[in-house]
Amino acid sequence: MSKKYIAEIVPLNSEVIGTKAHGKAVFIEEGDHLNIKIDMFDTPANMQHWEHFHGFPNGEIAQIATKEQDVNHDGFVDLPETEAVSGTTMVPFDNAPHHMHIPSDNYPISDDKGYFSYEINVPLNELQKKFKEVFGTDDLELDKRVIYVHGVPQDFKLPDTVAGEVGCYDTHVTLPIAVGKIVEVNEC
């Protein structure tokens, strides 16, 4: 029996970055695979965009961040500011989600119109094994997670108050530009 989840992805930080990134993600658990398909529109063009699902390891239901999470009032909701409502970064949507290697250069690249499509078929048992190793459970609980898409161009002026460096990647890479709540879909 398969399970299907979707996320309607809406803009975040659009007022300050000048693009209204939006799209849709579809997750289908079928047998021993998880198929992930994400289509994004109006992202900053011609650049790589990190994308992940975020959540709480204790099973609390994650919510999407809004401008209300801008606790330092600098006009930007940065990665650390999302954590209170969305939890931590969990699984990347890169070339190998089951490896759960967050900082990398293996994410989708938008075209000159800001569009990209990402699709991958992930070995579910490998992802669950790695998820258990990192978070203590093999239950992905997708219906308790949110998806984030990140990234603005390196020449975009960000205030010094924007935080969220990950390894050698700066806040231009990690700034959230879109977010969506993952919900289970019951189909007849």
Image (cartoon, rainbow, N blue to C red):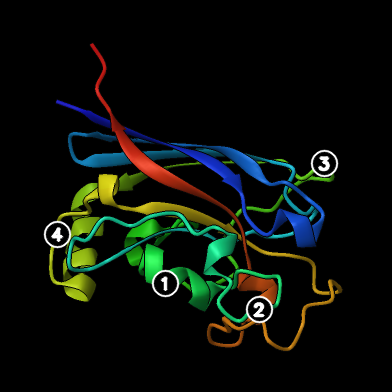
The residue indicated by pointer 2 is 171
Residue 121 at x, y percent in the picture: 37, 41
7 or 168: which is nearer to us?
7
Closer to viewer: mark 3 or mark 1:
1
The image shows residue 110, relative to residue 29, as above or below, that is below
At 58% from the left edge and 84% from the top edge, which residue is drawn?
Answer: 165
Q: Quadrant of the N terminus?
A: top left
* SS at badge 4: loop
Q: Quadrant of the C terminus?
A: top left
Closer to viewer: mark 2 or mark 1:
1
Mark found first going from the N terminus, 4 or 2: 4
Kind of residue indicated by mark 1: Glu
The image shows residue 10, relative to residue 60, as above or below, that is above
Q: Residue 47's image quarter?
A: bottom right
The residue indicated by pointer 1 is 83
Q: Which mark is residue 138?
A: 4
Left or right for 1, reference 180: left
Q: Residue 31's image quarter?
A: top left
